[in-house]
Amino acid sequence: MAEKPLPNATPNPGFEIPLSSDTFDGWEVKEFGHKAVLDFEEKMRGRASLRFDSTDKPQSSGLDHSLSPATISEYAFRFTGYVRTAELTGGASLYVVVHKADGKRYFDFLPEEVVSGNANWTRLELLIPKFSEVANARFGVLVWGHGSAWFDDLRMTSIDTNAPLSEQASTYLATALDTMEQNSIRRDSVNWPQVRESAYMLAAGSETTQDTYPAIEVAIRLLEDGHSHLYTPGEAKALQGDVTENAVLGPWVAPSGELLDSKIGYVSVPGFQGTNPTRTTRFADQLQAEIARLDSAHPCGWIVDLRNNWGGNVFAMLAGIGPLLGNGNAGGGVTAEGRTIFRAYNDGSSGEASISKAPYVLSLSHPPLAVLIGGKTASSGEALALAFIGKANTRTFGLPSAGATTGNSPFPLSDGAVLNLAITHMMDSAGKVYTGKIEPDVRVDSEGVDAAIGEATNWLNERCREASDTDR
């Protein structure tokens, strides 16, 4: 694929221009808790690299450069660079921001294209389609967290959008785009001719199905649902595997709990990823076993903590939390055409997930429930919260959720990759539809972990006293 340096890009892409001091000709440096310097010892190639070192309170720092509206309207381009990190607790990445004339903002930053920890030089790449009527555009690098990050050989090159695709690649890309247009929750809001044009531009010259992945990922971001994702064949296979953990699934985090004030059951439900039946059963079994252990003390109320639940497979979570939720309605979602999809828990099962033995039944039926949510409660973590919201004697505490309140569904592609598309807006158990963050009933602004637990415990103690008075 013929590519050329992008006109009007930075004159100092590799930080090679001899300078008398640590300045960065052609770049605008933004230091917020990091110090940027030229490093003449550690570099990918050439004379120097750019290094960011964290200070006492690192936030997010970076370096960027502007592109003219004429340039980004004329070219589709590829932004590449090399990144190295040392003891970096946050991450380092490339990014591109395009402000369109209509006020909308295209931000290209891939969570999977982040380097952290101790990593050798790693090549990162972002593909950007042409945008008409652009107000301004910037490209650069980001670093956040404690530690050090190096950047070198940052290049902007134009893509030859006239290079033909193979028949295999063209058919594959067309199928992926058709699947998006038919099923996306935003199908009626997307400029599909523009999305298709952008995808084919960036896929120019593709010979294999794998070559089209970057273009498909860009098309997904142009849906602007903030939730859809493409799993490669390897990632999809890992999600289906019967293993405790791997690079895709991450570490296994088991549900945990404790008894508070000798009468409040507290259970923390973490995110859970994976679709293998053995794996989902293992998680659901652990969650029900934890509820059964705590219920032996006959608590009069329960706290369900979802503040660290980033999502994953909601059915495994529902199958495990079912004794607290009760049989029946567990919320659901509404598709773009208005079709309602319901979720439910019934006797140890939800969807394709189930426990391995007889379902546990609480000693006290229909106890008061406090559900804790926060900014890290996302995706299926939010779906789990919505399964409780709308039910009697239930209240939410904490901070607004992440806002990934769309329901995703997998669409397998011919080579084993999977389009995980947002196809519904989530719905709580009372039928209310959500298109953004979940607002808690009781907002607890304190960052302290115990603050929301304290508020929830106080409310539950009141409910317990009321129930006790009624029984007399």
Image (cartoon, grey):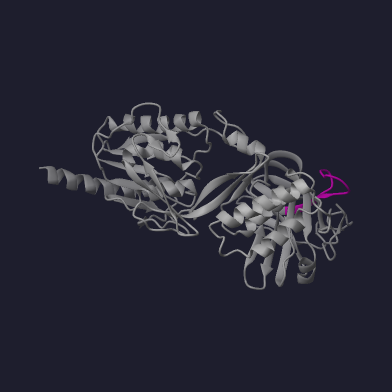
Query: Is any part of residue 368 visible from this angle?
Result: yes
Find residue 471 and report its horizontal and vertical position in percent: 12, 42
Find residue 470 and report its horizontal and vertical position in percent: 13, 46
Name the foreground residue: 171 vs 355: 171
As drawn, 302 above or below 5: above
- The quadrant in which the C terminus is found is top left
| Residue at image point 40% right, 43% down | 305
Name the foreground residue: 328 vs 95: 328
Q: Is residue 455 left or right of residue 382?
A: left
Q: Is residue 358 left or right of residue 119?
A: left
Residue 5 occupies which quadrant of the picture?
A: bottom right
Q: Residue furthest left?
A: 472
Q: Is residue 335 left or right of residue 397?
A: right
As drawn, 465 above or below 98: above
Image: magenta residue range: 36-49
| Residue at image point 38% right, 53% down | 428
Q: Is residue 145 left or right of residue 207?
A: left
- 383 drawn magenta: no
As drawn, 17 above or below 326: below
Query: Is any part of residue 29 visible from this angle?
Result: no
Residue 411 occupies which quadrant of the picture?
A: top right
- 38 drawn magenta: yes
Q: Residue furthest top?
A: 357
Name the foreground residue: 342 vs 311: 342
Find residue 267 and report its horizontal and vertical position in percent: 37, 38
As drawn, 43 above or below 246: below
